[in-house]
Image: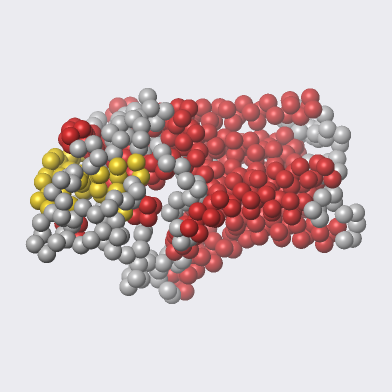
Amino acid sequence: MSHPRSDAACWLPVLAVVIGLAALRLATLLLALQDGDIGLHVDEAQYWHWAQTLEWGYYSKPPLIAALIAALTAIGGDGLIAVKSAGWLLYPLTALVLAWLAQSLARADRHDGPARPGPSDPPGMAPTTLAALLAATIFLTSPLAALLGLAATTDAPLLLFWSLASALLWRAGQATDRREALIAWALLGLVCGLGLLSKYSFAAWLPGAAWWLWLRHRSASQGARPPGLGAGPWLAGGLMVSMLLPHLLWSAGQGWPTLQHTVEITTAAAPAGDTAGRGDASWAGALARVGTVLGGFCVMLGPLWLLWLPVWLRPAPARRAAVDRSARHFVLTLHLPLLLLGLAQAVGSTPQINWTAPLQLGGVLWLALQLSARAHAATRWQRTALLVTLALHLLAGTAVPLAQRLWTAPVWAATGIPTGEPGTALPRRLDIWARMRGWPQAFAQLHDAASAHLQHWPGSPVIASSRTLIAQGAYEWRDLGAHWMAWAPPGPAHNHYQLTARWPPPAREGPRPDGAPCDESAEPLLIVADAPLPAGLLAQLAAPRLLAEARAAAAGHSVVRLQLWSARSRCAGRSAHPIRIDSPARP
């Protein structure tokens, strides 16, 4: 029988650790942004732009990340912190779910509520509580949570719903009555729908769940059948499909772009005639890519855990411990299919390390369960080593985002350690913010010229030839209410802007033979470029005129260079339906 008061007391250290580490991560982000030249990553800016016009799908991602950012920015405004809060808010929630699941798994062979502490356990710390505490701490101190938690990525909701689905599946399997089981199955179906709407790689969770259910069904045939095991999976599957239906209808209407994009990057498919990206086809190349996947797993979880490999592989103690075989098999069956898929994908094409990010959840749970099961026999040296491992991972996860400040900190002058002089940039390869630096300053330099143009011709579209320019420009010029469109040569769309806001529209006429504009009254276009205008774009323009240029320092010795052009279209056909921002920026 469970004891609610004891359970609540057990969660106090877990909550304290999660809140403390979340506060540290927020403080790290705020301090890093004090550099002043950091903006959004191109993917973050694109998600923010999508959030201004919510749809049931987008070219490269399902819709949940855009809806999440729309909700967060509606509350906190459009500043960097609000956009990036998708990371530093969801990762602590994931840690709490992992703690809950680890506690449930560690209690797998204890049917009388929270276990009592053993004679060698810390005062008041039961093995099940220790498993929960370790799961939350290992996850939040991992490089995965420390670094990705500073950005808005689709991995944040993916990991949350992956861990929540795992917890609900275990809860459904352990339910003691039909009503409790069906509630768990219904919630599981909703969570699976949200997981697939976050990122398609959530689908890799389903084979592991089906495998575990088959094992449960086989074991149930030899004894009492678990309640709800017959109708529950069908209920969960029906709810999951119903949640996916609007997205599937949108995707079908657009020609399945998200699925096609997912397949292309999974197989490293290159444009026609270009085999780059396939990688070395030899066995040595395949082994190197497999090593990249395994190495990426170790790095994202925390490289120092490799030193604990004997703990990973050592069999459970002979006496009944906080972890039984069913708990470990549950963790293994849920995550082994994803590992095999990741390795198989790496053998034939460029490995996508971030696609195997949910493997870290399995690693966290396995470590937490193995360590808590042996806590009764741990020596003082082993406990000290565990604390040092966690502390070093935490230190690294805090220092890396602040590397620019540490590089130029005056405190190093007295030590003789060679670092950068005040005002010098960190080498680009050491700067995790490298791709986010310089964009705010570059677009700010063009802002006045763009504003003057749009005030005179408020219906003038803004054209760019790359996803990066459109996403970064839409965010940095969010107060201008610009109509952004994507120029691209003839052919299939390669990003969401080319899919929904293409310029020139596919049905428009070609230029007149004499090269004169078809419609002299058409409003001139505004064009943003970071390189010479492509020949194909120039062929569509009449008398392009340079309005302004921008140059802003980025990471290392690199520079962001932009140009702002004005030109009329050689043939003003019917307009596309551009992605637009209908309201000025929120404060």
Q: Identify the residue at horizontal 71%, vertical 60% (top origin).
A: 211
Q: Quadrant of the C terminus?
A: top left
Q: Which color mode does the image show?
A: secondary structure
Q: Is residue 174 above or below residue 100?
A: below
Q: Is residue 104 above or below residue 340?
A: above
Picture quadrant where residue 201 is located: bottom right
The residue furthest bottom is 282
What is the x, y in percent for residue 282?
43, 75
What is the x, y in percent for residue 174?
80, 46
What is the x, y in percent for residue 192?
63, 49
Q: Identify the residue at horizontal 14%, vertical 61% (top origin).
A: 512
Q: Identify the residue at horizontal 25%, vertical 44% (top origin).
A: 461
Q: Identify the residue at horizontal 67%, vertical 55% (top origin).
A: 334
The answer to whether residue 207 is left or right of residue 180 is left
The answer to whether residue 170 is left or right of residue 549 is right
* 106, 306: nearer the viewer: 106
What is the x, y in percent for residue 339?
58, 59
* 373, 478: nearer the viewer: 478
Picture quadrant where residue 207 is located: bottom right
Q: Is residue 477 among the parts visible in the rendering?
A: yes
* 417, 409: nearer the viewer: 409
The residue furthest right is 223
* 122, 297: nearer the viewer: 297
